[in-house]
Image (tube, helix red, strand yellow):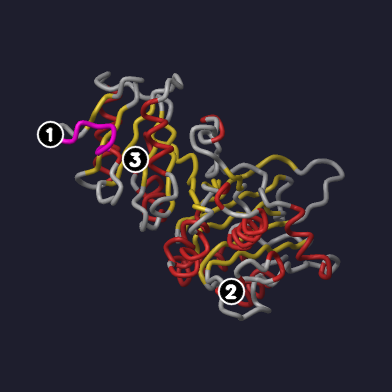
Amino acid sequence: MSLIPATILTGFLGSGKTTLLKRVLTEAHGQKIAVVENEFGEENIDNEILVADTTENIIQMSNGCICCTIRDDLRATLQDLAQKKRKGELDFERVVIETTGLADPGPVAQTFFMDDEVAEQYLLDSILTLVDAKHAVDQLNDRQEARRQVGFADQIFISKADLVSQDELDALVHRLKHMNPRAPMRPVHFGEVALKEVFDLRGFNLNAKLDIDPDFLSADDHDHAHHGHDHDHQHGEHCDHPSHQHHGHGHHHHHDDDVKSFVYRATRPFSPAKLEDFLGAIVQVYGPRMLRYKGVLHMEGTERKVIFQGVHQLMGSDLGPVWAEGEPRVSKMVFIGIDLPRDILVQGLDQSLA
């Protein structure tokens, strides 16, 4: 039986998650989607579109979607849904899990990898983070949960962009890209984003491309491009002003956010044993602060790319395609985390090269 794709929807209160979910649950899009909602949200979807006094916590919508609120833990809910689908009691093609506005998506994502029963039935497709352009600056300045949600994202949707100036929007996008250079980001008006741009994004696939906006990196990178293994851009490290001094000053300041990303590149191949030891040690120590990390690696002893990625302490790797003829064999890794010790990582990775 094929796996059920799951999408985690996260974002701060007021960022538009409910609008997006209402659309999924009511619009005639022809997809059968089960929406799983953490019930502790301040803005509960059911007040508006569900019968509030029902005792049954799974409700079938008119467009064929299902909405269910979590009363117990996510694991039990997912297993229950999968079992009902197998028995033919419920018909749905995919699951969307909405986390509460203050939640850390990490443990939700980990459920899909750590729990065998869930992993045998579901495929985690991606984490979508909604950012409210009008309130993002204050939320990012004041709340670490908001910054973590940005760091975790595979795709960032910026809502309410029409309520801010182009300069403010540009500054926000620049700030978000420093926190998470691997997530594509785009302003959306919910109601208008095509569902095909929300689903099947394959953010957790061990695919052989590392999606980092090349223009963004080269802009920060121009003065270290030619070292043997160039270590890119010092994110925010040469700017220690508190971020609230920067309102409206466009791109010229790096916000000193605690969620930062950095990219490591090397032209020499890695020694598999050394790299495995080093990464294993790093996730033991820094795992809770490592949000997402991914690499496409040139390894000694194989003609194929090696792809690895992880969430917190969980890391997986796989053999990718063969390096193409004439393709430069360069290892690229991106790390997104909270105050990660960049120098320790760089030194350890350098020492893991063959």
The residue mark sitting in front, 3 or 1, is 1
Q: Residue at x 56, y 62 (%)?
A: 336
54 to the left or right of 150: left
Of the 4 image quadrants, the one containing the C terminus is bottom right
Q: Is residue 348 magenta?
A: no
Q: Kindly identify which numbered label has been placed on residue 8.
A: none
Residue 207's spot in the image, x, y percent? 62, 42
Residue 281's spot in the image, x, y percent? 51, 69
Question: What amino acid type is highlighted by mark number 1?
Answer: Thr
Q: Is residue 53 magenta?
A: yes
Distance from disc 2 to disc 3, alpha carbons, whole Å, reads 38 Å
The residue mark sitting in front, 2 or 3, is 2
* Magenta region, residue range: 46-54
Q: Which residue is mark 3?
A: 118
Q: Residue at x 76, y 65 (%)?
A: 220
Of the 4 image quadrants, the one containing the N terminus is top left
Count residues near mark 1 (Cα–Cα under 10 Å), then give few for <14, some for 14-19, many for 20+.
Answer: few
Distance from disc 3 to disc 1, alpha carbons, whole Å, reads 26 Å
Distance from disc 2 to disc 1, alpha carbons, whole Å, reads 48 Å
Question: What amino acid type is highlighted by mark number 3?
Answer: Val
Earlier sequence position, callout 3 versus callout 1: 1
The tally of labels here is: 3
Question: What amino acid type is highlighted by mark number 2?
Answer: Asp
Earlier sequence position, callout 2 versus callout 3: 3
Residue 314: image quadrant is: bottom left
Element marked by disc 3: helix
Q: Which residue is mark 1?
A: 55
Q: In the picture shown, does residue 44 fall above or below 61?
A: below
Q: Which residue is mark 2?
A: 256
> Would you say the residues marked 2 and 1 are in contact, meaning their CB atoms lie under 8 Å apart?
no
341 or 46: nearer the eye?
46
